[in-house]
Image (tube, rainbow, N blue to C red):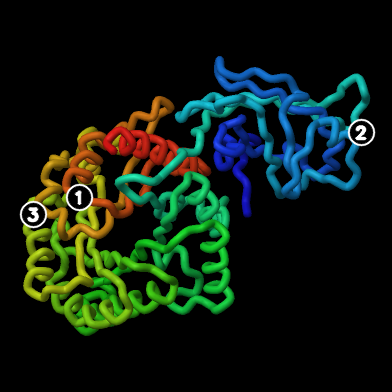
Amino acid sequence: MLLERDLIQSSGFRNVREGGRITGFQFRLRMPSYRGMAASLIDGVAVRVGNLVDVPADVPRWTFGGRQYSLQELWNSDGVRWPLEEAALVTVPFDGGLPQGVHELSIELRLRMSYIPLEHQPSTYRVSRAVTLAPEGGEGTFRYGVSLYSYMDDFGTVMDLETALASVADVGATGVEILGEAHVPHYPEPSTTWTDNWFALLEKYSLEPTNYGSWIDTRLHPGRSMTVTEGAAALQRDLRLAHRLGFSFVRPKIGVVSSDLVPDPIWTESVERSLDLAHELGVIICPEIHSPTPIKHPVVDDYIALIERTGTKNFGLLIDTGIFQDRPIPLRQGETRETRPAFLDGIGVDPADFAQIAQYVVFIQAKFHDINEQLEDQQIPWLPVLKALKDAGYTGYLSSEYEGERTPWRAIEQVRRQHALIRRIAGQLD
């Protein structure tokens, strides 16, 4: 598992319970040196959290190899090590714990470097970081998940599969969503070794596969469109792989023929030819309603018409919450309002429109772009959105889909903020 570059890691920041009582909080700390070292060389870590907590270096306790130590116990230890590749778990006693939200966590870490003259010791590392306390709970109206698309620029560069799944589990989510051609090595035929590891990691982090993203590339060959037979084959290939990996939903991203995302006409027959297989595998096919396509649109009407005409239980709608965006995404470097798609300013679908299609919706991707340190989403109005979902009887997954700035590791913290935000709002609705 890979670590974030910051000494203070986003993952692992949470309150600690003993019995039914919150007795403190903990966070993970990366070794700041270029090497691992004996834990007896630690001279402690002072911790401050805003105006709430300010403890001296000898108060926090340390966990290595699953065992917790006081600072004195570390000094007396022999053979306990802080490896370079593993984060230490630091626990701070604090009766009642920290309130939910974003906190400015500051540390002063002290290490004894034997090869540096005494007058320059201990080596001291002072860092601060705004980090979101892991949301508690998760029971209630909705289920919570994360799409690994949220970590796309990180995945394969500063994040591996286990790091991604551990980050999902660390926010208390239970569902994980992937993109077949992004996250499955040797797609569409992953090795048995990879598949076995996939299921082992799901078990380790108590996660269930939710939605599998696939593509029907209708412009696969230059000069001609994909045929119905080819479209059905592409969809069925992914239905089989999704089933093999334990997924319940498959989102086919179908090639489009217009700027408002009208799908290629082959979609209807390609899907109908695949419904029997979907039924056999226990998988639901669910194309997404994605900006700039609103809820009140012929595309949505056509999808519902197929459900009504066939009576299938293996086809439904996936809603991307980007359709509810009501404020613009900030311009990126080199962009102007004229040079980028207008829908990035938001199409502002009324959340009340959800009630008209709720009976057909099987999955929701909780798209977002930026949540600030006050847990305010800068584009999506979550209170009316979540209220509309609840009032319409939706109780399925809200699967985080971060699509904001791709600075390394930023997505981890942004997903944490979204879960803290939407669970707080959902809790107020229950």
**Of discs 3 and 1, which sits in the foreground?**
1
Is residue 101 in view from this perspective?
A: yes
Mark closest to the chain's N terminus, 2 or 3:
2
Amino acid carrying label 2: it is Ser
Is residue 330 in view from this perspective?
A: no
Q: CA distance from mark 2 to mark 1?
A: 63 Å
243 left or right of 118 in image: left
Q: Residue at x 52, y 53 (%)?
A: 164
Mark closest to the chain's N terminus, 3 or 1:
3
Residue occupied by mark 2? 114
Q: Quadrant of the C terminus?
A: top left
Residue occupied by mark 3? 297
Residue 258, quarter of picture: bottom left
| Residue 404, position as x, y percentages in the image | 38, 42
Q: Residue furthest front?
A: 19
Q: Is residue 412 above or below residue 97?
A: below
Q: Residue furthest top?
A: 51
Q: CA distance from mark 3 to mark 1?
A: 22 Å
Residue 104, quarter of picture: top right
Q: Residue at x 56, y 18 (%)?
A: 52
Give the crowd class for mark 3: few <14, some 14-19, many >=20 residues within 10 Å.
few
Q: Nearer the viewer, residue 230 or 65?
A: 65
Q: Is residue 129 above or below residue 183?
A: above
Amino acid carrying label 3: it is His
Q: Is residue 2 above or below residue 73?
A: below
Q: Secondary structure at mark 3?
A: loop
Identify the disc placed on residue 393. 1
| Residue 269, position as x, y percentages in the image | 14, 78
Q: Would you say the residues marked 2 and 1 are in contact, meaning their CB atoms lie under 8 Å apart?
A: no
Mark closest to the chain's N terminus, 2 or 1:
2
